[in-house]
Image (spheres, rainbow, N blue to C red):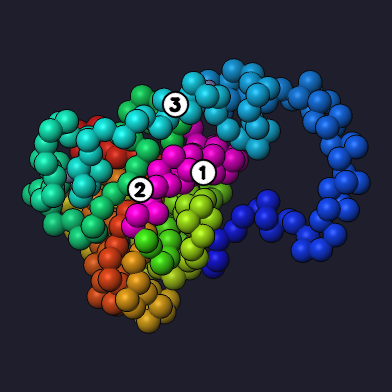
Amino acid sequence: MNSVNNTDAAKPAAGLSINKRSRSWWSAPLREVLDLAFPPRCLLCEVIDYSSNSHSGSYCSECAEQLCPLPINRCLCCGAEIGLYSMSENGCTHCRHRNLRFESVTCLGMYEGPIRKAILAAKWSFSAVPIRSLGRLLATERREELQLLKVDRVIPIPQHWRQRVFRHFNPAWIIAEEIASALQVPCDAHLLYRQRQTRAQKRVPVSQRFGNQAEAFSLQDMHVVDGERILLVDDVLTTGATCSEATKLLRQNGARECHVAVLGRVLDSSA
Ligand SMILES: [Zn+2]
Ligand SMILES: [Zn+2]
């Protein structure tokens, strides 16, 4: 499925300027009435923030800053924070002993403090608005880093159909849509699927997580990714077992490179 930009999708191809003009006289007063009745609040600290576009779900400038810490030295292979002068071409202490198959990880930051709070709230919300806002934040704040990867396709880590029965949405899919829209490449949410249900990774000992994901995925079409650079998207990355298993399958089917984008990087000790 191609990426969906709800705003763009709603735009008519013709007569746009006429519609805009006819709408303009009532849209501003309506916005003021809405602001009074439902003040726009930051999704994280809930402070009323009239300067933001919080009706569509966003964060105040202070929270947005905390959710996108300035890029410091991160491991090139797994995205973990490392010492300022540490080199990571061959991985870091968090990933060197693992056989991670993907090339790189892009993230907002480590899974702690405000980032952890925002991700947990978004994942367990009945609304998809908070997770979409975090996805948009990742897509815009890490745009340059993501553009350098020159990916051809964005693929979210899928849920098993049994998981979908109990969840309102797949967070990875929504984040992937936002990234694909920013990079202007297709978001393919149906290509990769889970052929068997695995135990939730957080309930499996760290040492068994790679085995838990073994042969978990399959592809709807084996020829689509041939020669392509792929960006796999998930909400968080802990051991990297899930994305590594998906990478293995994509590589077996001809993918040239596989990179990963997540909201937060979780270290094993805090998993
Ligand atoms: Zn805030
Ligand atoms: Zn690493």
The residue lying at 44 percent from left, 26 percent from top is 65
- Mark 2 Cβ inside 8 Å of ligand 2: no
Residue 269 drawn at (x, y percent) = 19, 33
Give the CA separation, mark 3 to mark 2: 18 Å
Residue under numbered circle 1: 136
In which quadrant will I find the C terminus? Answer: top left
> Is 44 on the left-hand or right-hand side of 54?
left
In which quadrant will I find the N terminus? Answer: bottom right
The residue lying at 48 percent from left, 24 percent from top is 63
The quarter of the rendering in which ligand 2 is drawn is: top left
Residue under numbered circle 3: 65
Q: Counting residues from the N terminus, which is met first, the one under dot 1 or under dot 2?
A: 1
Q: Are marks 3 and 1 in contact (CB under 8 Å)?
A: no
Q: Secondary structure at mark 1?
A: helix
Q: Counting residues from the N terminus, which is met first, the one under dot 3 or under dot 2?
A: 3
Q: Counting residues from the N terminus, which is met first, the one under dot 3 or under dot 1?
A: 3
Is 174 magenta? The answer is: no
Between label 1 and label 2, give the one nearer the viewer: 2
Residue type highlighted by circle 1: Arg
Residue under numbered circle 2: 145
Quick check: can you spot residue 149?
A: yes
Rendered view: 42 above or below 182: above
